[in-house]
Image: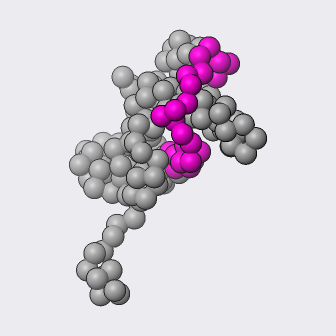
Amino acid sequence: VHNGYLMSEGEKMSKSLDNFFTVREVLKKYDAEVVRHLLIASHYRSPINYSEQSLQQSAKALERFYIALQDLDLANAKTLANSRFEKAFYAAMDDDFNTAEAFGVLFEIVTEINKQKADNSDLANQLGKLLVSLGGILGVLQANPKEFLQSDQSVEIDESAIDQLI
């Protein structure tokens, strides 16, 4: 869907300038969900600055979502229907597919989850279920939070160095 320019370090990405990355190269370092977040977190007509720093920022954003979801009981949570968050999310998506604004709504849900965790765990669980549901529309937040948080794909691991240390 994206039709804005892909930028690399502030310059239009192009093969002739040799400032491009292939998806295969990026997926060796980052989870596919991180790349997906980077590509859909801005409006589809806006340029995207595709860089190591922007990939790390997307990884941190997803980490914040998964930290909020980490200790919730989503399997037993009731569905929270017709909430102000759901309405705002769909309004953003109906406004020319404004995924940037939709992600803003998801961050508002994270803030509310963190507020409710201690006082009202049932509501926190319902909000978590809503967060996963709305995130699924954008193709994110479908992994197990613990597994996502334990797999830091932005750091290359030298297994032989680890073996030597052990």
Residue 141 % position (x, y): 45, 38
Q: Residue at x 72, y 37 (%)?
A: 120
Q: Is residue 66 magenta?
A: yes
Q: Quadrant of residue 88?
A: top right
Query: Is residue 143 shown above or below 97?
Result: below
Residue 13 % position (x, y): 35, 42
| Left or right relative to 23: residue 64 | right
Q: Nearer the viewer, residue 13 or 130?
A: 130
Can residue 93 be seen here? The reply is: yes
Residue 36 % position (x, y): 39, 38
Colour mode? Answer: one colour
Q: Give the extent of the magenta segment.
A: 61-85
Query: Is residue 76 shown above or below 143?
Result: above
Residue furthest to the right: 119
Q: Residue at x 56, y 25 (%)?
A: 78
Q: Nearer the viewer, residue 30 or 136?
A: 136
Q: Residue at x 40, y 42 (%)?
A: 143
Q: Residue at x 42, y 45 (%)?
A: 144
Q: Is residue 18 magenta?
A: no
Q: Nearer the viewer, residue 131 or 41?
A: 131
| Quadrant that contains the N terminus | top left
Can residue 19 be seen here? The reply is: no
